[in-house]
Image: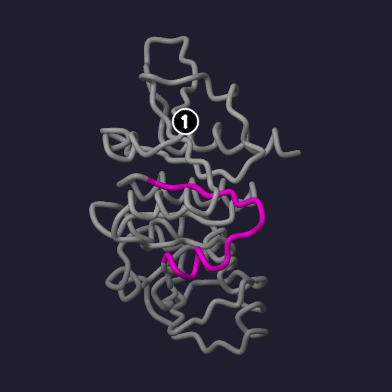
Amino acid sequence: MYVCGKNVCRELLLNNRKVEKLYLSESFKDREFLDLVSKKNIKATILSKFEMDRIKFENHQGIIMKIEDYKYLNEKEMLDNLPENPFIVILDHIEDPHNFGAIIRTCEAAGVHYIIIPKNRSVSVNETVMKTSVGALDNVKIVLVTNLNNIINKLKEKGVWVVGTDMKDSVVYTEIDYKLPIALVIGSEGFGMSNLVKKNCDFIARIPMFGKINSLNASVATGVMIYEVVRQRN
């Protein structure tokens, strides 16, 4: 995949991500970045702005990198390596890459052990997610599964309690004990959790709303839930 912009490219280099190609605009003059490229022994191809725009027609800031596609974990790799008190986030068909990138950043900051996403009808790790997460992607473990309900049941067999998020038939999110092994389920932007996923949850939590809007952005709701877990565990 191609990524662009100084911030995300710098983070990828600092995280030792393998770079297949590096393109720099002939007008690119960021000495700090150029020194980093030299230190990593990466050979850059110098192009005109027109040539850069043909590769990636957006605000690339004079730098474009081609890197290998993201490598997901499978469910066996996760289940065989669960920590003693796991903290997992399950995304039930999130579709917006900006939301996904923001959720990845929050999960990395909070020490979430795994993020689970379904294979179909869900956003995948692409260049927008990479850019929005600003380097956090290299420090989180994302698990790609074919069926969310199957993995939820397998996690429950491992002693993990599953907490979904919905306004109906729920309790205030602060009333749940998150000190136990926990998997938080966040529903999609337009439809929330699917009915079967909701039925498989041990608890359903809601974030109180006091305005006229009855729901939060998915990444904001995820952040609120995640940091309640962090608050209780610390």
Q: Quadrant of residue 40?
A: bottom right
Whole-percent x and y of residue 90? 43, 47
Q: Residue at x 53, y 50 (%)?
A: 88
Indicate whether 70 appears above or below 207. below
Front residue of 178 and 90:
178
Magenta segment, which residues?
A: 75-91
Q: Is residue 128 magenta?
A: no
Q: Quadrant of residue 51?
A: bottom left
Q: Which residue is mark 1?
A: 203
Whole-percent x and y of residue 186? 41, 39
Front residue of 178 and 41:
178
Q: Residue at x 49, y 22 (%)?
A: 207
Q: Quadrant of the C terminus?
A: top right
Indicate whether 25 appears above or below 6. below
Front residue of 67 and 154:
154
Task: Left or right? Give the position of 153 relative to 34.
Answer: left
Query: Number of marks in the image?
Result: 1
Residue lying at the far left in this picture: please name it.
121
Q: Quadrant of the N terminus?
A: bottom left
Whole-percent x and y of residue 133? 50, 54
Residue lying at the far right in this picture: please name it.
234
- Quick one: label 1, few (<14), some, or many (20+) residues within 10 Å? some
